[in-house]
Image (cartoon, rainbow, N blue to C red):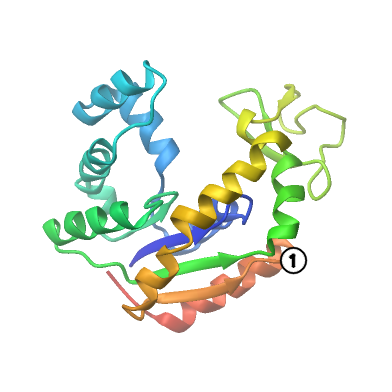
Amino acid sequence: MQILFLGAPGAGKGTQCKRIATQLDLPHLSSGDLLREAVKAGTAAGAKAKSFMDQGVLVPDEVLIDMFREKLAQPECKGGFILDGFPRNVAQAEALDKLLAEIKKDLSVVVDLTVDFSKLKERITGRRLCANKACNAPYHLKFAAPKVENKCDLCGSELYQRSDDKEELVEARLKTYSEQTAPLTAYYSKRNILKEVDGNGEADAIYAKLSDLFKSLKVHA
C-alpha cells in the first residue's frame, strides 16, 4: 500500500503517520527526515541538497525527487510506504507521479486530515520537542504537557519550540498551505483516491478513524 497524507501545518500528520506506519508495518517517509538522512549519509541527492541548504535557500524540486528516488529503491519500501510532507504543490505531485511510474507503483490512497483553521494556531504554537536529538519526544503545552515544566519526561532534557512554530510565522505558513498545498485535494480527488478524515478532536479518536479507514480499504501494494 502506498499512502500519502495531506493536511495543513498542525493537522497532526506526523503523529498519525507514525502510528499508522506501525499498524501497517510500512516505512514512514517524512520529507524533512529524509532530507536530513540523505545529507548525513552523503548520498548523491544528499550532497546536492546540502549545497543548497548551506546557502540558506530552498532545496529544488528535482533534488527532492532524486532523494525520494534513492529511498524508494531501497528494499524496505518494496512493500509500500507512507509519504508525509511531500508533495507540497501540484508541480511536485506531477513529478511524484512520474517517479512512481518509473518504479511501477501507484498511490493507493491519499488521506486529507482536515482541521478547522481556527484551531491550528493553538496546536502549532503549543508544540514543543525534546532538545536531545536521540530522544526528540514531542509535547504540547495544552494537550500533552510534560510532567515537569519545560523538561522531557523521558530523558530530562530541556524542551524547545521550533522556530517556524512561533506565532509570528504561523500565519505565513497557513497562507502558504492554502495557496500551494490545498489545491492537491482537487488534484487527487479527480483520481478517486482522496479520503477526507476529520482531524479535529483528540489524537486517539483521530487514530481510530484512520485505523478503521485502512481496515475498510483492504488495498495492498
Report the side of 37 relative to 116 (left or right). Answer: left
Q: Residue at x 36, y 71 (%)?
A: 188
Residue 78 showing in the rendered view: no
Report the side of 119 relative to 217 (left or right). Answer: right
Q: Quadrant of residue 94?
A: bottom left
Q: Characterize the local packing of mark 1: few (<14), some (14-19) or many (20 or more) Cα atoms within 10 angstroms.
A: few
Q: Residue at x 80, y 27 (%)?
A: 151
Q: Which is nearer the eye, 111 or 188?
A: 188
Q: Residue at x 38, y 31 (%)?
A: 58
Q: Residue at x 31, y 73 (%)?
A: 220
Residue 172 showing in the rendered view: yes
Quadrant assignment for the C terminus: bottom left
Residue type (three-letter) at the residue carrying disc 1 = Gly
Q: In the image as oriented, which residue stretches furthest toward the right? A: 148
Position of residue 127 measured from the top left corner of the image (x, y, whole percent): 71, 40
* Residue 64 against residue 204 in the figure, above or below: above
Quadrant assignment for the N terminus: bottom left
Residue behind mark 1: 201
* Residue 193 against residue 27 in the figure, above or below: below
Report the side of 157 relative to 100 (left or right). Answer: right
* Residue 43 against residue 104 in the figure, above or below: above
Q: Quadrant of residue 105?
A: bottom left
Position of residue 73 measured from the top left corner of the image (x, y, whole percent): 19, 47
Q: Which is nearer the eye, 123 or 174?
A: 174
* Residue 28 against residue 97 in the figure, above or below: above
Q: Secondary structure at mark 1?
A: loop
Position of residue 182 measured from the top left corner of the image (x, y, whole percent): 48, 61
Position of residue 87 measured from the top left corner of the image (x, y, whole percent): 37, 52
**Figure label count:** 1
Q: In the image as oriented, which residue stretches furthest toward the top? A: 54
